[in-house]
Image: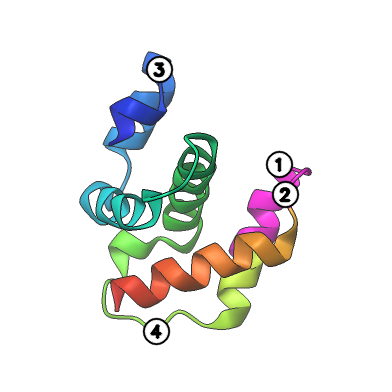
Amino acid sequence: MFNQLFFRSDALTRQLSAPLVDERRQYLAHCAQGMSKCTPRMKARLLLSTAEYLRLAERPNDAISLVEMVEAQLAFAKKLACQAVARILHSTRGWVAHLS
């Protein structure tokens, strides 16, 4: 899945070597049906940022609060000012629910 979304070797390596690679891949495959290639690519970046910021691999059984999700996505939004926080939060909620 990631090799279809990322063509630069550094971006692909970052996606493949980051925490929860299988979980992120499965969720992206779940979401990708009917989406343009741009949407899953952005979602992949978002999921990677979320996994790193929230340290999800280190806390697999912890409940993730809405406040934590918002904080993580505000950090991501600072990197990508063109994204609206509501859209990012919607994607994060779906992924965290999928992990549960």
Q: Which segment is the magenta one? A: 72-83
Residue that protrudes farthest toward the left in the picture: 22
Rendering coords of residue 75 (x, y %)? 67, 54
Under circle 4, the secondary element is: loop
Which numbered disc flags the more N-terminal residue, 3 or 2? 3
> What amino acid does circle 4 point to?
Ala
**How far, Cα to Cα, is label 2 from label 4?**
26 Å
Image depth: mark 3 or mark 1 in front:
3
**How far, Cα to Cα, is label 3 from label 2?**
22 Å
Quadrant of the image containing the C terminus = bottom left
Mark 4: few, some, or many residues within 10 Å (few <14, many ≥20)? few
Q: Give the labeled residue for mark 4.
A: 63
Is there CB contact under 8 Å for labels 2 and 4? no
Predominant secondary structure, magenta span: helix
Q: Give the labeled residue for mark 3.
A: 7
Q: Which mark is residue 83?
A: 2
Q: Give the labeled residue for mark 1.
A: 80
**How far, Cα to Cα, is label 4 from label 3?**
34 Å
Left/right placement of residue 71 relative to residue 32 reads right
Under circle 3, the secondary element is: loop
Is there CB contact under 8 Å for labels 2 and 1? yes
> What amino acid does circle 1 point to?
Leu
Q: Residue at x 36, y 35 (%)?
A: 15
Image depth: mark 2 or mark 1 in front:
2
Quadrant of the image containing the N terminus = top left
Mark 2: few, some, or many residues within 10 Å (few <14, many ≥20)? some
The answer to which of 21 and 88 lies nearer the viewer is 88
Image depth: mark 2 or mark 4 in front:
2
> What amino acid does circle 2 point to?
Gln
